[in-house]
Image: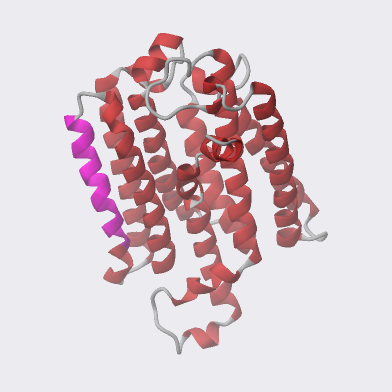
Amino acid sequence: MTLFKAWLSAARLRTLPLSVSGVIVGSSLGWGVVYEQTIQQALEKLPTVGFRHAGVWESPLFWLAILTTIGFQVLSNFANDYGDGIKGTDANRKGEKRMVASGMISAKQMKRGMIITAVLTLFIASLLIFIAFGNEQFLLAFLFFNLTLASILAAVKYTVGKSAYGYSGFGDVFVFLFFGLLSVLGSYFLFTKNLEWDLLLPAASIGFFSTAVLNLNNMRDIENDSAVGKNTLVVKMGSMRAKKYHYLLLCFGMICALGYTFLNFQDPVRFLYAIAFVPLVFNIVSVARNREPSRLDSELKKVALSTFAFAILFGWLH
């Protein structure tokens, strides 16, 4: 493996669609509100579903938010590789290799990669904040800048350091907060400078689905994590309770999304995003039947890509 391919492997590109799902949902909903406010008269002559959100793909706010989120995710992946590598967690890992543990990338190189990624992400996030708030809304810009710093810290502290929260069972909480609530609500606020209470429902959906992906990852790695003292929530609960927890995460995620649509729309077409829930139902069945944790790896992709598909369909239809 070349060094370039090693860095691509450490970046774990397959995790990126899940990481941007919250931005897609929040930005699409926020863009729809702005569109209605600015060209209300034109709306009366246009179709009722899906048209408003096509323009979000042309918004610099959207793409800067996407790039910022990708930066957070890649930083988290590098930090995970580095933290687990220097602690020996991945020494006897089965399946996909980790770059620091395998020696393809040294710990020093990975640490340098983390610093470069963090600086680039901070720069992109700062540009996003400036475009969104300018000089006129200093307090909001200051708040979002601090949220950016908190996101960078959370990405690193998942596995790095003595108090790494991924080793004490708090990873699920941080994934729900940052992938779900902060991602959706923050993206929406960038467009509208306002929040509505019912936005907690789609934000929670993305949070629950993202946490379900982490839970699958931890169920797959339960034997290795238990052996090396990585006390994830799955290790603490055990496999059977982790499965029940997984069912609840997916069911709550689907219920929250359907609840938001039911509260705000009467058009049945708005519910078509539920097509993306079909693989999630099959995932519940697969997890229930699973007896070998290593075989859950393919289920990770199923839930992650289903969440990404849900985000696109939900944003387009609302």
Counting from the top left corner in percent of width and height, residue 282 is at 21, 44
Q: Is residue 87 one of those drawn in magenta?
A: no
Which residue lies most toward the right here? Answer: 135
Q: Is residue 42 above or below residue 270?
A: below
Q: Is residue 135 above or below residue 168?
A: below
Counting from the top left corner in percent of width and height, residue 235 is at 37, 17
Which residue lies most toward the front here? Answer: 2
Q: Residue at x 58, y 47 (%)?
A: 70
Counting from the top left corner in percent of width and height, residue 189 is at 61, 57
Which residue lies most toward the bottom here? Answer: 45
Give the side of residue 111 with respect to residue 77, left or right.
right
Residue 148, quarter of the rendered image: top right
Q: Magenta stretch: dominant SS?
A: helix
Q: Which residues are magenta?
A: 273-289
Give the side of residue 291 with respect to residue 180, left or right.
left
Can see residue 33?
Answer: no
Q: Is residue 285 one of those drawn in magenta?
A: yes
Quarter of the picture containing the C terminus is bottom left
Q: Is residue 295 above or below residue 34?
A: above
Q: Residue at x 31, y 49 (%)?
A: 254
Of residues 265 and 281, the one drawn nearer to the viewer in this rendering: 281
Can see residue 149?
Answer: yes
Q: Is residue 144 above or below residue 48?
A: above
Q: Residue at x 44, y 86 (%)?
A: 46
